[in-house]
């Protein structure tokens, strides 16, 4: 297998990064008036400015060369042609097939996957239209007003993030709710806001074995029965999305109310499939299809654009530049749009479950750092919380600022303040403020000379914090689809370069297995097994108090 750190481009980057370490970003701008044009790119209604990164043209060329030497173009083709690139699970990763429009057939196990995708999409459309038209009715003959998506991880984060983002496109008369946590407090709160006569539950689980989802689904079922709904009428209130249709049927969901997904769709890449049923119900099927077409537009760009003008590739390379050559440990996602407030959480799963790996595809341990810690918060709230550390703390934190140029509300003053803050923050993070500039600014504010000296260092900002700025003309289903697909492909390219499999998630298993043991012990179903002293102590502490 490819030895990443032995690649000529990697070794050149190692040398090259020394020259850039001390180079202030502001001087890179001063030295090159064409820097913004050179390092920014537009695709349709999505614009990316990556000029506020610690790169020169030479850095950029070396990074692109790294992608070439790591085989990124070949891997892109492998993904699009349906190769089993998820090697540990021996399957392809074909989320791109869920949004393809009239492209070549992708054959998996002798079958064109496009056929099943189209059939399922037609089934979703029929169902969504029957709910919206009121043809689909609850047990008391009333139309559906509330949809509750019960799922977790990829079966929750994507649908919830998109529904919040597309609030402006919601159809009249349908509210959506999300239940993910096994903490009963969440479903209890949802019950307070729904009516059993007019609620539809989607049990959304690729595996249909997930503890949280099964527990919540059972509770929803019991709640409906307790509200007086007859067992025979539950079918009017429950549908399922799963690869495991047998388990869904065993749970009591009618076969015609089960929507299939397939093992070649990763959970965190599944919002484009029936997993996104709540989205289609919330915004309507046409908007759902516009979301898919936005993603398809990004897919087309990703597959065909040369590496040097390929947005997901560029963003992946910039991430690798900081993680592997500058020691950055995290990646901040900062959407300056309230509607995108769940994007950081969504991207946490997308990125950290995909690239939080320490062995390569061949099982050998990596000798470099892989996926970053992804975190973030909506702007401008973050500015009044953690931006202090970005401006003056001791960590290098690459950040993506994401905003929309045009608002979809009538409050122009708010929008100018929002956008102005986004632009100002990236400028401040890039430029910083020298101690002389700090003195000057303090003097201008009328600060007495003795205070100027006392405060000058406290008002010094090192700057040099790298940022990308992603601007959508406006947030609509199409541009949102582009944005999400951009990140999916960025994550894939990073995984390719690091030589890891971005499509499995073995790391979540151990905790699940151990939780099952302890859950049983908490219920008194088995004698406590051989835990460490801390876990035994905590278990006894909980049991004593639960039993008292
Ligand atoms: O525990 C991790 C995980 O398997 C995720 O990968 C997945 O998105 C989530 O659990 C939910 O899984 P399912 O859709 O099978 O319930």
Image (cartoon, rainbow, N blue to C red):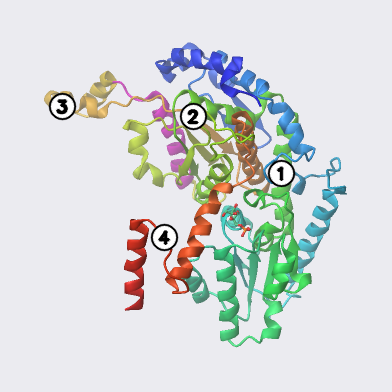
Identify the residue under disc 4: 530
N-term-proximal mark, 4 vs 2: 2
Between 42 and 253, the one lying in front of the other is 253
Measure the alpha-carbon separation of dots 4 and 2. 39 Å
The reply to whether dot 3 and dot 1 touch (C-beta < 8 Å) is no
Does residue 326 sit above or below 303 in this rendering?
Answer: above
Report the span colored magenta: 413-434
* Magenta residue check for 421: yes
Measure the alpha-carbon separation of dots 1 and 2. 25 Å
Q: Looking at the magenta stretch, what is its main secondary structure?
A: helix
Q: Which mark is residue 454?
A: 3
The answer to whether residue 210 is seen in the rendering is yes
Q: Is residue 215 left or right of residue 278?
A: left
The reply to whether dot 2 and dot 3 touch (C-beta < 8 Å) is no
Identify the residue under disc 2: 323
N-term-proximal mark, 2 vs 3: 2
Q: Residues within 10 Å of mark 1 (few under 14, many from 20)?
A: many
Identify the residue under disc 1: 93
């Amino acid at each position: 297998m490819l030895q990443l750190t032995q690649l000529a481009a990697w070794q050149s980057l190692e040398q090259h990064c020394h020259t850039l370490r001390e180079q202030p970003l502001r001087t890179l701008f001063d030295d090159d008036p064409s820097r913004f044009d050179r390092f920014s790119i537009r695709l349709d209604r999505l614009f990316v400015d990556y000029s506020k990164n610690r790169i020169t043209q030479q850095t950029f060329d070396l990074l692109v060369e790294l992608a070439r030497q790591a085989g990124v173009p070949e891997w892109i083709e492998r993904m699009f042609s349906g190769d089993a690139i998820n090697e540990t699970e021996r399957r392809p990763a074909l989320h791109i097939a869920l949004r393809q429009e009239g492209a070549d057939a992708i054959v998996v196990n002798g079958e064109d996957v496009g056929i099943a995708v189209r059939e399922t999409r037609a089934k979703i459309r029929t169902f969504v239209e029957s709910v919206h038209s009121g043809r689909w009715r609850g047990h008391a003959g009333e139309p559906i007003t509330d949809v509750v998506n019960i799922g977790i991880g990829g079966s929750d984060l994507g649908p919830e993030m998109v529904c919040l983002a597309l609030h402006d496109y919601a159809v009249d008369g349908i509210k959506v709710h999300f239940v993910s946590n096994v903490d009963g407090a969440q479903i209890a709160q949802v019950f307070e806001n729904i009516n059993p006569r007019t609620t539809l539950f989607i049990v959304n689980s690729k595996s249909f074995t997930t503890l949280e989802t099964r527990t919540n689904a059972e509770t929803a079922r019991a709640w409906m029965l307790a509200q007086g709904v007859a067992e025979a009428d539950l079918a009017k209130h429950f549908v399922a999305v799963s690869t495991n249709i047998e388990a869904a049927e065993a749970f009591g969901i009618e076969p015609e109310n089960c929507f299939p997904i397939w093992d070649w769709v990763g959970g965190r890449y599944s919002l484009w499939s029936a997993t996104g049923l709540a989205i289609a119900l919330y915004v309507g099927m046409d908007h759902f299809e516009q979301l898919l077409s936005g993603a398809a537009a990004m897919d087309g760009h990703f597959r065909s654009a040369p590496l040097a003008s390929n947005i997901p590739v560029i963003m992946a390379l910039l991430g690798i530049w900081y993680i592997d050559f500058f020691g950055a440990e995290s990646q901040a996602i900062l959407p300056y749009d309230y509607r995108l407030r769940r994007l950081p959480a969504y991207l946490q799963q997308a990125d950290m479950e995909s690239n939080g790996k320490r062995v390569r595809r061949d099982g050998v341990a990596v000798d470099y750092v892989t996926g970053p810690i992804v975190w973030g918060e909506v702007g401008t709230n973050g500015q009044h919380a953690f931006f202090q550390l970005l401006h003056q703390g001791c960590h290098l934190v690459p950040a993506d600022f994401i905003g929309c140029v045009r608002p979809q509300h009538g409050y122009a003053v708010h929008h100018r303040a929002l956008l102005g803050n986004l632009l100002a923050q990236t400028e401040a993070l890039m430029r910083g403020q020298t101690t002389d500039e700090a003195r000057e600014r303090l003097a201008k504010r009328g600060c007495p000379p003795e205070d100027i000296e006392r405060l000058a260092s406290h008002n010094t900002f090192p700057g040099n914090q790298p940022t990308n700025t992603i601007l959508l003309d406006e947030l609509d289903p199409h541009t949102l689809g582009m944005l999400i697909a951009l990140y999916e492909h960025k994550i894939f390219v990073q995984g390719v370069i690091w030589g890891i499999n971005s499509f499995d998630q073995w790391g979540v298993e151990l905790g699940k297995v151990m939780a099952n043991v302890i859950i049983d012990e908490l219920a008194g179903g088995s004698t406590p097994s051989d835990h460490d002293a801390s876990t035994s102590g905590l278990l006894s502490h909980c049991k004593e108090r639960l039993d008292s």
